[in-house]
Amino acid sequence: MEALIPVINKLQDVFNTVGADIIQLPQIAVVGTQSSGKSSVLESLVGRDLLPRGTGIVTRRPLILQLVHVDPEDRRKTGEENEPNAWKNGRLYKGVDGDEWGKFLHTKNKVYTDFDEIRQEIETETERISGNNKGISDEPIHLKIFSPHVVNLTLVDLPGITKVPVGDQPKDIELQIRELILKYISNPNCIILAVTAANTDMATSEALKVAREVDTDGRRTLAVVTKLDLMDAGTDAMDVLMGRVIPVKLGLIGVVNRSQLDINNKKCVADSIRDEYAFLQKKYPSLANRNGTKYLARTLNRLLMHHIRDCLPELKTRINVLAAQYQSLLSSYGEPVDDKSATLLQLITKFATEYCNTIEGTAKYIETTELCGGARICYIFHETFGRTLESVDPLGGLTTIDVLTAIRNATGPRPALFVPEVSFELLVKRQVKRLEEPSLRCVELVHEEMQRIIQHCSNYSTQELLRFPKLHDAIVEVVTSLLRKRLPVTNEMVHNLVAIELAYINTKHPDFADACGVMNNNIEEQRRNRMRELPSAVPRDKMGGGAQGEQDGGTGTWRGMLKKGEESQGEDRNKLQSSVPASPQRGHAVNLLDVPVPVARKLSAREQRDCEVIERLIKSYFLIVRKNIQDSVPKAVMHFLVNHVKDSLQSELVGQLYKPALLDDLLTESEDMAQRRNEAADMLKALQRASQVIAEIRETHLW
């Protein structure tokens, strides 16, 4: 059991070297108001004067005080594993005379045998960090005292709680001290030693109040009542010491400190402990053996040991978990670069591979929150682009008047017998041209996604790149410019695809011929029906239109079909259309002499039929072209942009970046990376050492 406290002290040493607050080691923190006697309690536990004294705020930095019990006969016990040269010729700490000595962490292996010198060093070290005004600092001073007269203990002396700033203290000194105290006592593995003077009311004890904040049920608070000899005449601390006033789980111990006069007169601690015992026997005979400094030291030692025993399993787990975390952190920082050209080539290749894998969908890191890479490109082709094309109305932007005007303009000065072919071509080209814009937008969207993949790769897959910001920027630059180079080529191709469709209107296209055939039959049938129903009062010009259709009805060509009357869309549309005056809508129908088309005139039945036939044909041909474009644009984008980039990315990166002149510059690590790597390596070493230290404890030691 006794072996436990030195274990914690060793762990403390291990972590002090890296300055870690991440491990919450078991310790005892001493809390109390200014001048409540904290320092006196600590000195009586050590048995020597070693702490700075005076009025006002004296303790301005936490002092971590490790008391190490040494056996005067066998001093080799204090030899520490990490100091193989500590003892020579069987004599430990060459040059140490006397039974007791101290060592500071910040002065390395220097040994102090003069306790006045230790006090002086504490003051100097405090001023070095906190300055010589009355400010405080949370950076601790570590002091070890080796002595045969102490029990193994680790204590933290904290600045005294104060309320009002004095002298040139900062205005928020109360808050600063409070935060510092809470930082230490919030640690669930910390025993709180709450010091209160007996000549104040326990109910107003600041130390107990602040302890209660972090330890609500008092499970780890031990109260110490100082200055029992300074109580008002006629009062005693019986009720307080019996725990009737403020009950504390770990108990309540009264002590008598040396007065300032005793200290000035150099009264030694041993004498004051003897006097304390006499005072307790006389004033509180029934409680004498459960109070006093000696009892306090033994209680603290016992508490700390039991406390360490309870904390150890959890501590072990925490150290192992942290070691694993730091190991992976260190791996993510990567090894310092030895062979620069190999590293560069490796990183470039890895990036190129990941980029291609993201497009293929075989990347290691699969995004779950949104589509990315190849999946998004597929979505752009078949959802975004596909839907946009489907939403393009074959006759969008074409009014009946536009169609009619085109027909009339295409016939020239002579009234036509047939619907001119030119008007169909002219109008269909105008509609097909509308497919170009969505096609180019599709290229743009794919290009944007290819750009986004760069970010995706450097975020997830090739995180090593973040170590070398210059290389990262260079890679991004190369890929971006490669994409930029391919954009005009792909746009040109897509533009050509639409231009090809416009170049030759293939009315012999099998799908189009089928559509014409179906239409022919429909028209023929409808014409017969209409002829049967034709009333006798129909004017001759309308009859003429019908008769004219009959003369050429048997040709079966689309020309023959075009001139036939066709009113498939029912009477409603007829009535609707014919009631619309033939005005030049939005300036489309403008005749050569700028004489507006007569506004009052209704469309004649023939004009109506001609327009409908042309509209039908336009729709039919447009759908064929749209299908082609919907199929060929994604193929063009894949070939000219996506696959080209995929195939040439690696060689492009190597060609532009793998140059001896660029090596050093590209593989410059970010400023803080090397420092972070060293810190992580130190921390990992400390954790592994700590793990060893804990592993050395045999289970049998615990009970």
Image: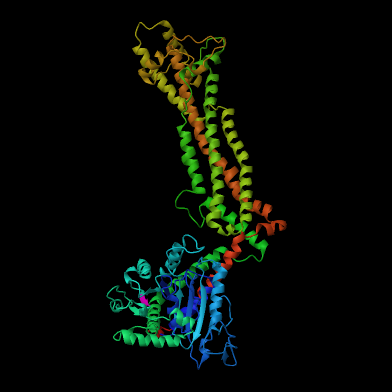
Q: Would you say residue 26 is visible in this rendering?
A: no
Give the percent coordinates (x, y) of residue 132: 55, 68
* Residue 192 drawn at (x, y percent): 39, 73
The magenta stretch spans residue 79: no
Q: Nearer the viewer, residue 670 or 602?
A: 670
Principal secondary structure, stretch drawn in magenta: strand
Q: Going by the picture, which residue comes out furthest to the right?
A: 661
Q: Considering only vertical position in the picture, is 561 above or below 693?
A: above
Asked if residue 394 shows in the view, the reply is yes
Which of 427/223 is in front? Answer: 223
**In the drawing, does residue 630 fall left or right of residue 347?**
left
Up-down relation of residue 654 to residue 97 (above or below): above
Q: Residue furthest front?
A: 233
- Figure quadrant of residue 457: bottom right
Q: Is 223 one of the magenta-colored residues? A: yes
Please give the count of numbered marks on the rendered protein.
Answer: 0
Magenta residues (range): 222-226
What residue is shown at x 56% (from left), y 30% (from top)?
501
